[in-house]
Image (spheres, rainbow, N blue to C red):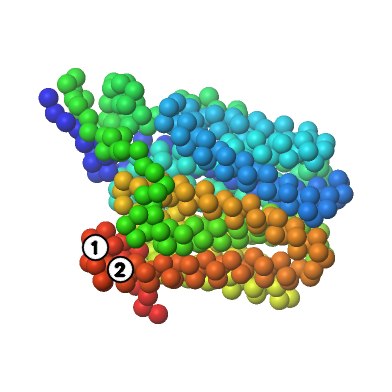
Amino acid sequence: MRTIDVAALLNGAKLNSFHTSLLLWSALIIIFDGYDLVIYGVVLPSLMKDWGLTALQAGLLGSCALLGMMVGALTFGSLSDRIGRRKAITTCVVLFSGVTFINGFARTPEEFALCRFVAGIGIGGVMPNVIALMNEYSPNRLRGRLISIIFAGYAVGGVVSAALGMLLIPRWGWSSVFFVAAVPLFVLPLLVRQLPESINFLLRKGQVNSAQQLLQKAEPSYAPQANDTFHLEAGQAPKVSIVQTFQEGRLTNTLLLWLAFCCSLLMIYGISAWLPKLMNTAGYGVNSSIGFLLVLNFGAIFGSLFGGWLADRLGLGRVLLCFLILSSLVLSLMAVKAPLPVLYTLIAIAGGGTFGAQILANAFAVQYYPAHIRSTGLGWAMGIGRIGAIIGPMLGAAIHGADLPMEFSFLAFAIPGLIGASAIGVFQIRVKRRAQASLDPQSVKTLQSTTPSSLDV
């Protein structure tokens, strides 16, 4: 009889066709997810014109999907432990694709709001499960890069949403871009067949043969034996309480992380929801206004991929701090009238800075918390951060509804970047001081992994 350390086996595997297939399917799911999320910003100018919506109504409609995302993340995060990640992911895909398609038939703001909320549950539920599945199977040395590629799928979905909006809305109206959301339903049979289940889940449910087959695909050097036993480090972890993220001197740092997440997500969802309408109000046509959203998401793709590469070389903490400051600076500059090429450049940089900062913030939180509370720490940071995501569209609505100049909107979205950067800066100072004062091993490890050079300014 031999004991197989599942995590060690998967961590040491070499990248092969199994990992590539999982990466492609995971990225495709997040592209669909991103399409359905960004779609509201694409249709907002047409929707306000057709229905005569006030800015307040538009802001509330924009926040419905984000509220649903919070519910979805909390619901499907725990549900997947009972039904498996594959079932949770496919259920979410059916939910956000099917309901977004139905959204195209909405004829009142109330119907639209209900559809966006329900679709948001699927949108919010799929991301943590896809990331968890990719995290489980990824070789340790490639994990960060593979997950960054998946995160970039959100921005790719945003690009597709904006591009199709420019193509379809002038000819067939805003409903047409919602009908396109049904496409994932046609590839669902392939998805169900190709997407692997979590090995940890299979072993906890006693499905040893299925787990062994997947282990062999992920690491071909593994030869299954009938008497194999398996060590599941994550599966045997005790139940963790949110209180533990506040213990051992982590209270202030956890609150600082929550503040940074709120600010980062406020910028992302506020500018994504209102950018086309702001530019339309500034005198640009509907297609040109949607084009700005296209540029924003192109920049986001670059920022999502480039940020992780840069963090590996300069230090995660330093790059996160710079991305937040850069986002704030660029959004402030957008408040100044500039030639169109300059404006496009600023918007692309804003997309890269805001989306890149959020991905780096996720990694920052993961590296800060000890292994046994890591998922809880990140989950709560992302959950609390959704408050900022909900506030973002409503903040844009309040400014637009008050008939303030467009410049005020960009300045309002820039301020959270400075607040978030300040929170991360204070966080790093506290971690460094504690590590130096107590020589606590976890603090020293955190300091080395998150702030090797971030304070050398």
Q: Report whether 240 appears left or right of 164.
A: left
Q: Quadrant of the N terminus?
A: top left
Which residue sits furthest left?
1
| Residue denoted by label 2 | 434
Q: Quadrant of residue 434?
A: bottom left
Q: To which residue does mark 1 refer?
A: 440
Could you tell me which secondary element the residue under label 1 belongs to?
Answer: loop
Q: Residue 143 location, x and y as percent?
A: 35, 49
Q: Amino acid at mark 1?
A: Asp
Q: Is residue 311 visible?
A: no
Residue drawn at (27%, 59%) of the image: 442
Q: Which mark is residue 409?
A: none
* Visible residue check, residue 58: yes
x 16%, y 31%: residue: 3
Q: Residue at x 27, y 26 (%)?
A: 212
Q: Quadrant of the C terminus?
A: bottom left
Q: Position of residue 356 (x, y in %)?
A: 50, 60
Whichever of labels 1 and 2 marks the residue nearer the N terminus, that label is 2
Q: Are marks 1 and 2 in contact (CB under 8 Å)?
A: yes
Which sits in the foreground, 125 or 173? Answer: 125
The quadrant where residue 211 appears: top left
Residue 285: % across, % down: 81, 59
Q: Secondary structure at mark 2?
A: helix
